[in-house]
Amino acid sequence: MHRKGFGFFVLTALAAILTLTVVACGGGEKKSSANTPTSGGVAPADQQTLIVQSSEPEFFDPHRSNFEQDIAVERALFRGLYQLELDSSDNVVAVPAMAASEPQVSGNVYTIKLKSGLTWSDGKPLTAKDFEYSLKRECSADTAGPYQYVLGAGMLDLVGCDDLFNGKGTADAVGVKAIDDTTLQMTLKAPKPTFTTIMSLWATFPVRQDIVEKFGDKWTDPANIVVNGPYTLTEFVAKDHVTLAPNPKWALEPKPLLQKITVKFIDDQEVAFRAFQTGELDMTSIPATEIPTILADPTLKSEYLQIGSLRIWSVEMQMNNEVIKNPKVRLALSRAIDRESLVKVVYNDAYLPATYWLVKGIPGYQGNGPFENVIGFDEAAAKQALADAGYPNGQGFPKLTITVTDNPVRKAEGEFLQQSWKQILNIDTEIQAVDAKTRSDTFNSKNFQLFPGGWQIDYPDAENSLIGLFNTGGGQNQYECSDPDIDAKLKAAGSETDNTKRIQDLKDAETLIVTRLCGMAPIWQGAFLYLVNPKVGGVRATGAIDAAMPGNWCPECWFIKAQ
């Protein structure tokens, strides 16, 4: 579909998003519109191989994933009824993928026709029944999907989905039904302007019932998995790499030109940077500390992409911890963080210091103004808050653990926080550095105390940064924020049809969340920093919908240019 899928409220965000998603490259070259096979020429098939860096996914199962490294691979393997992409003006739009067209809407009932002749990678038909099974699987408590909430109350509001997830209903009562092989009917509690946008997310991707039931947790192993996306999974080596190959049954255009994609699992961006320099990687994320090196080198400068992102970063705090549950402790921790110094020292001023949560670039953005004097850097206020919490000058304060990814940049950030809290509050913390997969598991199992982490929006609307993240029991609320005032504001926003009032409800919720530090203390808004070999074409990077890799909203667009 076209922009209508974002509803009336997202259209106002697009101009601001464009400011953030323009790619700044060496020499001022704009690479958000990548070279195409027509303009650049295509290398022979035996040269169509790409090696790209990412972290190791926790899952290849789209119904269980909530980290970008998982989603990056799953977008290549699966595709839903609709998909998010960039139009010719670099606006984010939702368009039909497996669906043949826009849904037919009658009140609360949405009817979606599938394209004819769709198949899985093994040649078996892909039908509406597969989507019925998959949506019900996402709603099931047995799946325990962290993104189930996008189908539930306040978001899509699919009838019966929350009841099934909470053990109060049956799969038969969920409002999704295959009328025939190419017709899917979905019943919501109310019409939803963002229907096609939500139905573009990985939580709605189809998976095959017979494969899941036959192989259980091993259904995504390369020998077992069947997919409907542009690529298939041919090899997975834990802690090393995954290999993808074209899916000959891929139904859409373009067909993949790359004959092999290798995703190397490298958490340490310094290691990845060196691997790019030696030709071992074709695309990689890079640490902000290397920006001066890159800008001083004409070749690297020409390969450099800096993309403003709709990502907010924070110190996430486990609210069930007996110490952290004290709001004055959280206030002391937040007010002892000099965000401007952190961004300068650790990230070379590549990011924006932030005491806000709703990012610059979407309606509802309030910026630092309302929050800086409440939770921002103030040594005296930090010390007083800790004393008010019962720990004057840090006396009797237990040692807390900061969990970070095991790479130099994230460890440097952890050390900055550790030193700040020691110098200002006289408290000790321990840094736990782990690989990306372990970090994901630690977060999802809620087995953390202090966790520098963030939120990259899935689609450009404030609801996506709040609902499900801060309401009691929300699918992304691993820090266990629970506040009746916040719940009330988010519930009101989820049912409000007047957009001005809806945005105000979301802003009010943000104000409560930030000023009460409910589960997190914001510290910066980020950017994506990449190096891309000039031989790679088809990369249209965006800070709005990319996950872990530049332009990975369309991996089937990538190719190797003729040399």
Image (spheres, rainbow, N blue to C red):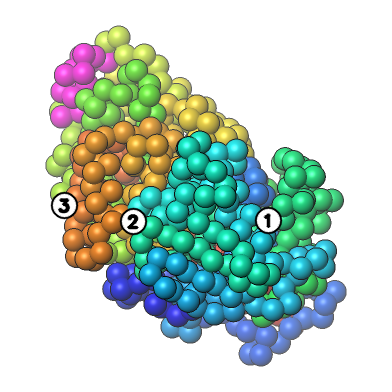
Q: Nearer the viewer, residue 216 or 231?
A: 216
Q: CA distance from mark 3 to mark 1?
A: 45 Å
Q: Dot 1, crowdedness within 10 Å: few (<14), some or many (≥20)?
A: many
Mark toward the start of the polypeptide (3 vs 1): 1
Q: Position of residue 107 (x, y in %)?
A: 38, 70
- Amino acid type shown at disc 3: Gly
Q: Above or below — where is 144 with respect to 294?
A: above
Stretch of the chain drawn in magenta: 381-394
Q: Secondary structure at mark 2?
A: helix
470 relative to 132, above or below: above
Can the viewer see residue 516?
yes
Please tell me whether residue 463 is drawn above or below residue 320 in the rendered image. Answer: below
Q: Residue furthest bottom?
A: 38
Q: Residue at x 26, y 35 (%)?
A: 483
x and y percent of residue 457 in the render? Answer: 42, 57
Q: Is residue 441 left or right of residue 456?
A: right
Q: Secondary structure at mark 3?
A: loop
Residue 204 position, x and y percent, is 56, 58
Mark 3 sits on what residue? 369
Which residue does the numbered mark 2 point to in the structure image? 463
Instruction: Name the residue: 66% across, 90% down.
Output: 38
Q: Where, by quadrant of the figure, is residue 309 drawn? A: bottom left
**CA neighbours of label 3 inside 10 A, class few (<14), some (14 to 19), many (20+):** few
